[in-house]
């Protein structure tokens, strides 16, 4: 097949084109120019691109075609030398707030993968790195210690919990363990310590006592396995030097924080997706933006006094309830309700907008002769609207 | 949020600009173990490449977490372009619509390089473009014209850029060769001495910008993409002003205060949003020309004899419209797994009105014929009816003489919609105290169109109004009375006023990217220099 060197368009009449015959060289940068409305787009998009796209779509099955927009055949006699066409227009972005530069370019997908595979997790509670290790990694790590080092291999079964744990200790004795470390002290399991159930305790089971030397690997591996099974994948090696403080090395088989016990099941790319419930921030559903009420819209005109409608949400209702509320607040904070909003002290403005916090205010309401008094905190205009927004499901209230 | 690489978690990485993210990527391998490096290598390569492409198309200031909906049309187009280059396909035909929109002259060079790369990969790239530099750099140029609409549709000239320049019949060639150009005004307007001052604007990346917008002048806001031009002009100035003057409900970007708004009576933002989303909206309805047209028809003796009211001539209410298609002129037939088919209404044959209504004729034309006329034709057709003629005049003045009076709003381009809005403002009686804000009005315009548009904008200023234009087009910038250059770079590197003053002043400011490109244009005999 002879190589096609040009795209030949014959008899294009789309829109205002006047039976145009044109040859466009292939594999070159071609610019189409002219006055606006002169037919540039008619030639480039509505004729050349449309035909390229149409031919491609037509080659698909009828089933596939239903998902694609079928283009009308452009008004042209014939076009030869076409390649599959891709148009890059300007109106292609979606208005979905979940679509970002990162997702459109797929960079975000790669980032998620990168973080899932090579990222180091840190415990949110303690800020320490969380690592997943195999038993043999742990053995290797222990064997790096100086030969002759003495130590205890511990399995932490209780971490900072209240209780007596009598039954647990009995059970451990039955399994053949001899010692436990409770709140930093070692005890024989034959004579278990009495624990106060009102306090929080730490309990480690002493799985093995070791002295580092050649050939210890097999025994160490077995002991580690036992410790990991006992304490849900965590084991601790505590050295027992003759003097000085013992050194503690924590091992974890899971992605778990050895101190707080915080675990991440498995790090997967979807954990980093703000679109999956798995990884998204629960407050904003991963959008990163929350709906809120704008202070400036609540107080559109700062020159008005509160009593005369400075607070927009209260302006429409002529209910005496609002007026009496304002009077009560004015009395409590000792200011003049006739002052313009902008001249009010800042803390009073805050009370109106965001509530009185802990401070109780005495309200006196007069409803067509019935008078009643209440002592309560003032909710604030903005929290009040937010609450009503959340609680309602009638759409007009939301607007 | 607790998983980190090189000390940063994923949320921090996506908050970085593309430029910073690329640096971060380069620093990652050093912090990983050999085994993890092995895993990461392929992934990092992909990320680095993509970041590189985005950088090449001039988008290094965007952050990865930037919401796609908030991108400008040009930005999103360039993002798609960047991902296409990444795909590495060959033998493909790419068709692009004005990729240079919204790009500062400086970024334009990089974009052109990207397009050439695409070509060098073995693809055909067809670009619809008005940018002078793009035309000069092209391998092959097609000039279509000569006029717009029915006056266009012919190939005027084709060949290499040099061929086009040599062709006397091509308007584009004339501009390229400098036989025609947009004149620099001999004198910059002094303005009326008043100004609007924005104090300490801090929206987005603006760094406590305080700046004066002189009134009674043609003011141009310039600067590289992402520098903060729109934030200052539209988000801060326009939104605050429209809240104060027009009573609109807006959430403007924060600034301390705006002084001098008392010199204005209204502010109007003329943007490129469509004038209407329904096919029932059209230039005639938008500019308000349709009402006098209907009144005119209702006032004809024949209509009076039959007792037809103006409503009879509306295609939106029952009475005069064709009921078979409810005034649409076409009937939509849903074809399930084939695309919907629009067929011309059998009853009215696309005229949108019923037979009785169409019998009312003015100079032999029915109301349907009028809607099918181009604006130019309607202008002479209604010569004697000032209410209609004025509106048509305004449309012709903004260069829209070729559109049809009843053209559906959905088929108008963004630039056309913007000019329809502009013409509506032109037709109004001017108060001389209006502030017009336009965001890149030359989008989609050819040199010749730009000239016409500038005439119109300058006319608004002559009437005492103030025009603030956000623009990259140097031809527009050089005719401005006053320039405010924002930058110097995009994103974090921007947000300050680099230069302000007349074009001559700005050209003398070495820190201003705009000034550097502007300088050569201001020399009186540029053609001779080339």
Image (cartoon, rainbow, N blue to C red):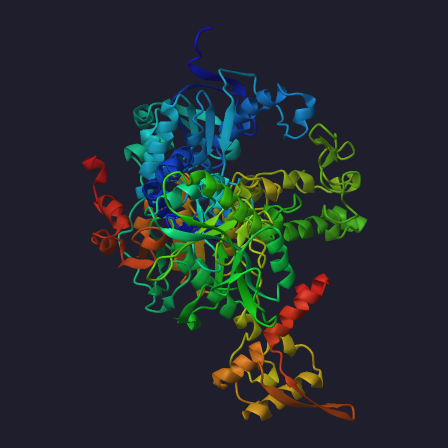
Answer whether residue B140 is visible to the viewer in this image.
Answer: no
Q: Is residue B348 above or below residue B167?
A: below
Question: Which image quarter is the C terminus of chain A in?
Answer: bottom right
Residue furthest front in the image: A190
Foreground residue, B527 or A111? A111
Foreground residue, A304 or B372? A304
Residue B479 horizontal/vertical position (percent):
32, 50
Residue B442: image quadrant is top left
Residue A353 horizontal/vertical position (percent):
56, 77
Left or right placement of residue B473 versus residue A388 in this view: left
Residue B394 horizontal/vertical position (percent):
50, 50
Q: Is residue A373 above or below residue A214?
A: below
Q: Residue at x 58, y 69 (%)?
A: A195
Foreground residue, B186 or A211? A211
Left or right placement of residue A168 versus residue B14 in this view: right
Residue furthest top in the image: A1
Number of numbered markers: 0
Residue A136: image quadrant is top left
Residue B217: image quadrant is bottom left
Residue A390 horizontal/vertical position (percent):
67, 65
Answer whether residue B8 is visible to the viewer in this image.
Answer: yes
Left or right placement of residue B135 versus residue A274 in this view: left
């Amino acid at each position: 097949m002879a190589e096609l060197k040009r795209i030949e368009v014959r008899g294009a009449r789309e829109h205002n084109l006047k039976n145009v015959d044109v040859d466009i060289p292939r594999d070159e940068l071609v610019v189409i120019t002219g006055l606006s409305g002169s037919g540039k787009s008619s030639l480039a998009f509505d004729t050349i691109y449309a035909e390229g796209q149409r031919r491609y779509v037509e080659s698909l099955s009828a089933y596939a075609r239903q998902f694609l927009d079928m283009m009308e055949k452009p008004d042209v006699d014939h076009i030869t030398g076409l390649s599959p066409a891709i148009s890059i227009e300007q109106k292609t972005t979606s208005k979905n707030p979940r679509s970002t530069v990162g997702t459109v370019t797929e960079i975000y997908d790669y980032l998620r993968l990168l973080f899932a595979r090579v990222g180091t997790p840190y415990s949110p509670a303690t800020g320490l790195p969380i690592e997943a290790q195999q038993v043999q990694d742990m053995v290797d790590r222990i064997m790096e210690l100086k030969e002759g080092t003495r130590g205890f291999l511990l399995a932490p079964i209780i971490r900072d919990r209240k209780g007596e744990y009598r039954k647990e200790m009995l059970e451990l004795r039955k399994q053949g363990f001899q010692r436990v470390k409770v709140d930093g002290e070692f005890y024989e399991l034959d004579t278990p310590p009495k624990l106060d159930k009102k306090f929080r305790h730490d309990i480690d089971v002493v799985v093995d006592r070791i002295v580092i030397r050649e050939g210890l690997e097999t025994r160490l591996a077995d002991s580690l396995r036992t410790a990991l099974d006992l304490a849900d994948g965590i084991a601790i090696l505590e050295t027992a030097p003759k003097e000085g403080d013992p050194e503690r090395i924590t091992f974890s088989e899971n992605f778990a924080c050895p101190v707080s016990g915080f675990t991440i099941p498995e790090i997967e790319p979807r954990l980093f997706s703000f679109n999956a419930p798995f990884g998204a921030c629960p407050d904003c559903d991963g959008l990163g933006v929350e709906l809120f009420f704008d202070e400036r819209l609540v107080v559109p005109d700062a020159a008005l006094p509160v009593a005369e409608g400075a607070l927009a949400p209260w302006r429409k209702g002529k209910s005496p309830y609002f007026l009496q509320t304002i009077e009560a607040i004015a009395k409590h904070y000792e200011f003049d309700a006739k002052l313009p909003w902008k001249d009010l002290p800042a803390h009073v403005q805050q009370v109106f907008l965001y509530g009185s916090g802990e401070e109780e205010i005495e309200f006196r309401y007069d409803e067509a002769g019935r008078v009643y008094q209440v002592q309560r905190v003032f909710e604030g205009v903005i929290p009040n609207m937010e609450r009503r927004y959340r609680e309602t499901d009638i759409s007009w209230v939301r607007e | 949020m607790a998983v980190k690489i090189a000390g940063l978690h994923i949320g921090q990485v996506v908050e970085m600009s593309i430029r910073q993210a690329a640096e971060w990527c380069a620093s990652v391998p050093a912090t990983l173990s050999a085994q993890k490096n092995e895993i990461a290598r392929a992934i990092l390569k992909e990320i680095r490449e993509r970041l590189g492409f985005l950088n090449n198309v001039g988008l290094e200031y965007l952050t990865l977490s930037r919401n796609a909906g908030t991108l400008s049309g040009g930005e999103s187009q360039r993002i798609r372009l960047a991902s296409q280059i990444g795909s590495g396909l060959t033998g493909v035909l790419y068709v692009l619509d004005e990729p240079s929109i919204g790009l500062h002259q400086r970024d334009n060079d990089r974009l052109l390089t990207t397009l050439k790369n695409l070509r060098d990969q073995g693809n055909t790239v067809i670009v619809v473009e008005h940018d002078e530099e793009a035309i000069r750099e092209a391998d092959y140029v097609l000039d279509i014209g000569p006029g717009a609409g029915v006056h266009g549709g012919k190939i005027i000239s084709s060949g290499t850029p040099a061929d086009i320049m040599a062709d006397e019949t091509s308007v584009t060639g004339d501009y390229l060769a400098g036989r025609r150009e947009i004149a620099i005004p001999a004198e910059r307007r002094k303005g009326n001495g008043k100004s609007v001052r924005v104090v300490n604007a801090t929206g987005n990346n603006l760094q406590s910008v305080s700046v004066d917008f002189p009134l009674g002048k043609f003011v141009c806001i310039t600067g590289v993409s992402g520098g903060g031009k729109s934030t200052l002009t539209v988000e801060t100035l326009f939104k605050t002003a429209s809240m104060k003057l027009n009573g609109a409900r807006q959430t403007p970007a924060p600034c301390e205060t705006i002084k001098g708004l008392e010199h204005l009576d209204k502010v109007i933002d003329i943007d490129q949003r469509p004038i209407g989303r329904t096919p029932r909206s059209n230039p005639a309805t938008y500019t308000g020309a349709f009402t006098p047209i209907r009144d005119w028809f209702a006032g004809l003796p024949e209509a009076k004899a039959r007792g037809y009211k103006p409503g009879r001539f509306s295609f939106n209410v029952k009475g005069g419209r064709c009921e078979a298609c409810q005034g649409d002129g076409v009937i939509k037939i849903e074809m399930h797994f084939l695309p919907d088919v629009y067929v011309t209404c059998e009853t009215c044959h696309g005229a949108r009105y019923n037979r009785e209504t169409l019998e009312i004729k003015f100079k032999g034309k029915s109301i349907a014929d009028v809607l099918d006329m181009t604006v130019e034709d309607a202008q002479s057709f209604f010569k004697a009816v000032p209410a209609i003629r004025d509106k048509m005049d305004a449309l012709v003045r903004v260069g829209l003489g070729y559109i049809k009076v009843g053209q559906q709003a959905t088929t108008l381009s963004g630039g056309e919609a913007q000019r329809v809005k502009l013409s509506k403002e032109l037709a109004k009686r001017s108060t001389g105290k209006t502030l017009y804000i336009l965001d890149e009005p030359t989008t989609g315009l050819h040199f010749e169109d730009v000239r016409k548009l500038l005439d119109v904008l300058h006319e608004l200023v002559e009437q005492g109004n103030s025009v603030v234009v956000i623009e990259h087009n140097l031809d527009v910038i050089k005719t401005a009375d006053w320039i405010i250059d924002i930058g110097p770079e995009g994103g974090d590197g921007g947000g300050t006023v680099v230069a302000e003053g007349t074009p001559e002043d700005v050209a003398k400011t070495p820190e201003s990217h705009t000034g550097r490109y502007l300088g050569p244009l201001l020399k009186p005999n540029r053609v001779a220099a080339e």
